[in-house]
Amino acid sequence: MPLVESFLQTTAPSSQPQPQQNRYQVLNVVSRGSYGVVYRAWDTEAGEIVAIKHELTGLSRSTLREIKILQSLPRHRSIVELKKVTVDERGKVLVVMEFMPSDLSRLIAARKKPFTAPQLKVSVWRILKGVLFLHENGVLHRDLKPSNILINQKDRIKICDFGLSRWESESGSYSPEVGTQWYRAPELLMGKTNYTGAIDMWAVGCVMAELVLLKALFPGNSEIQQLGYIHLTLGPALQLMLSVSVPMLTPAGLDLLISLLAFDPNDRITAKDALQHPWFLEF
Ligand code: ADP
């Protein structure tokens, strides 16, 4: 971790008083992305573990967007908490957030057997709560995927990575080049620029299917192949695949999934309606 060593200590947390000029002690690297690194660190002032996103190249548009959106939103239990934005001695931005021990991508990769019906239901419920909160506050996340959904030991789920998010009210046409391809809604793949929160609902459908199947539903290598997968899989083929391979998904659960994966965004279920779906009343 060469860049951070000058301002962050890399020792383990200690009960001894620490020099206050180094508020954050790096414990380990959580993830390395194209813009920077996410660290797990000890906040010596607050006495807690935090996650720190550290920009390597200066302030990127995506980090600026993430900071603005997180600062403008009220606190919500399904959205990662922004604790502080600060800079290191070289002027590189540090985004300090609450720390979450895992994300759905890592959880799915480590999973040997299917999630139980209650585990699946509670996860989808909490993701939908977070998305409803964002949409009610006029924010489109635009990059929902398992690695951007954090989870802790109590199965609390928090949405993170607002680097591609935007307010629905922002003027100008929207870029269709948003989101990670496997989770990108058909209208984005077809280049539509006046899309709605329905793109996030599609991504929630892909995440729900991935929780069920323990693998990505539409793992296309190109935009064309992605659309091809979607065309091949939607409809009766999806119903058959899920009802054969995952009997724990009841007809009501399957109905919700199909409503999330409606090809036409106007037919796709909203977060509000999805939370009212009868699947959540089944025990
Ligand atoms: P990037 O935009 O650089 O990909 P993300 O915000 O998506 O950065 O974070 C990358 C990864 O870092 C996430 O997939 C997650 O595993 C981890 N991560 C992000 N925020 C936190 C956090 N608050 N607590 C723990 N891990 C986090």
Image: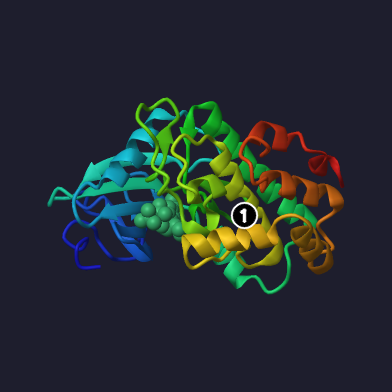
Return the x and y of residue 188 as percentages of the image width and height: 49, 47
Mark 1 CB in 8 Å range of ligand 1?
Answer: no
Residue under circle 1? 206
Residue 224 left/right relative to 258: left
For residue 86, above or below residue 74: below
Return the x and y of residue 80 as percentages of the image width and height: 47, 43
Return the x and y of residue 283 as percentages of the image width and height: 87, 47
Residue 206 left/right relative to 12: right
Q: Quadrant of ligand 1?
A: bottom left
Image quadrant occupied by the N terminus: bottom left
Q: Nearer the viewer, residue 243 or 172?
A: 172
For residue 22, above or below residue 247: above
For residue 152, above or below residue 270: below
Name which residue type carries label 1. Cys
Task: Tell me the element at label 1.
Answer: helix
Return the x and y of residue 259 as percentages of the image width and height: 72, 44
Q: Nearer the viewer, residue 23 or 82?
A: 82
Q: Residue at x 79, y 50 (%)?
A: 253
Q: Nearer the viewer, residue 192 or 124?
A: 192
Q: Residue at x 66, y 39 (%)?
A: 268
Residue 234, quarter of picture: bottom right
Q: Residue at x 38, y 42 (%)?
A: 175
**Residue 211, can we see it?**
no
Q: Nearer the viewer, residue 168 or 173?
A: 173
